[in-house]
């Protein structure tokens, strides 16, 4: 069976650290909630990822288009729960998190609250309708450092870290911005 790749996905998004969940100006109990398990079999720039979001299971391969690391093509295949149960334990790095999705001041926001060895890490990802809107966005005060372009902040790299290691990286990173 031959699977055709999905159409290239172009997203306009920015990612930020959230220092304290108590500083958020919205009620997470009103947000859409998903439990996520991700495993990786390869790293950047072209990770192979297995993921469960609640009861939906997928295998995704990302391909870098040309020399621009910001443009990726994704090929995603659905998996059965039984396939996920066999493949997930074989991933050499894993992430566990709860994602809260909601709209805030017209922006789609995904708030990832990590569990396991990354417990304490909270990342907010804002999606934008256009490049212009993304560039004009002024981060609100409840957000910490922007980590959009930081390779260490991708899920495939975070899966190799602990929360204390992320804190050390952030301390050095924040001194440079």
Image (cartoon, grey):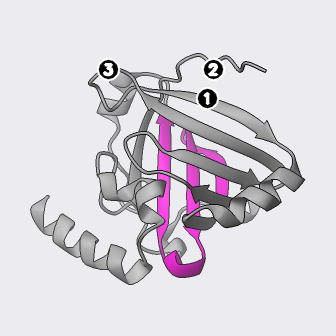
x, y percent for residue 104: 57, 45
Please tell me whether residue 122 belongs to the stretch shown in magenta.
yes
In this view, the residue in front, 97 or 110, is 97
- Observer-nearest residue: 52 or 84? 84
Q: Is 71 part of what is drawn in magenta?
A: no
> Which one is in front, 90 or 114?
90
Q: Position of residue 159 (x, y in %)?
A: 48, 65
Q: Which mark is residue 6?
A: 2
Q: Quadrant of the C terminus?
A: bottom left
Local SS, label 3 = loop
Query: Which residue is depicted at the point 65% across and 63% down?
Result: 90
Element assignment for label 1: strand
Most common SS among magenta residues: strand
Q: Measuring 48% from the left and 44% from the top, which residue is drawn there?
A: 47
State if disc 1 and disc 2 touch (CB < 8 Å).
yes
Left/right placement of residue 10 relative to residue 138 reads: right
Horizontal side of residue 80 vs 58, given as left or right: right
Density class for disc 1 (Cα within 10 Å; few <14, some 14-19, many ≥20) is: some
Residue neighbourhood size for the residue with mark 3, other residues' Cα within 10 Å, grouped as few (<14), some (14–19), many (≥20): few
> Residue beneath label 3, please?
66
Residue that mark 1 sits on: 75
Q: Residue at x 79, y 54 (%)?
A: 84
Report x, y in % for residue 116: 59, 79
In this rendering, the answer to whether 80 lies above or below 39 is: above
N-terminal label among 2 and 3: 2
Give the answer, above or below, for where 4 lies relative to 170: above
Give the residues drawn in magenta, as a range: 98-127
- The answer to whether residue 121 shows anywhere in this view is yes
């Amino acid at each position: 069976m031959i699977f055709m790749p999905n159409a290239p996905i172009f997203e306009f998004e920015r990612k930020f650290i959230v220092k304290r969940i108590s500083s958020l100006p919205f009620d997470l109990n009103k947000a859409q909630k998903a439990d996520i398990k991700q495993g990786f079999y390869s790293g950047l720039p072209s990770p192979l990822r297995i993921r469960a979001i609640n009861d939906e299971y997928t295998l995704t391969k990302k391909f870098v288009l040309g020399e621009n690391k910001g443009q990726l093509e994704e090929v995603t295949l659905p998996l059965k729960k039984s396939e996920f149960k066999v493949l997930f334990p074989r991933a050499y790095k894993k992430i566990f998190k709860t994602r809260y999705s909601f709209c805030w001041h017209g922006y789609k926001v995904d708030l990832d609250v990590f569990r396991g060895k990354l417990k304490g890490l909270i990342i907010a990802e804002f999606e934008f309708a256009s490049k212009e809107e993304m560039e004009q966005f002024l981060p609100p005060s409840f957000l910490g450092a922007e980590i959009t372009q930081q390779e260490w902040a991708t899920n495939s790299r975070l899966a190799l870290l602990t929360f204390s290691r992320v804190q050390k990286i952030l301390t050095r990173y924040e001194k440079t911005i």
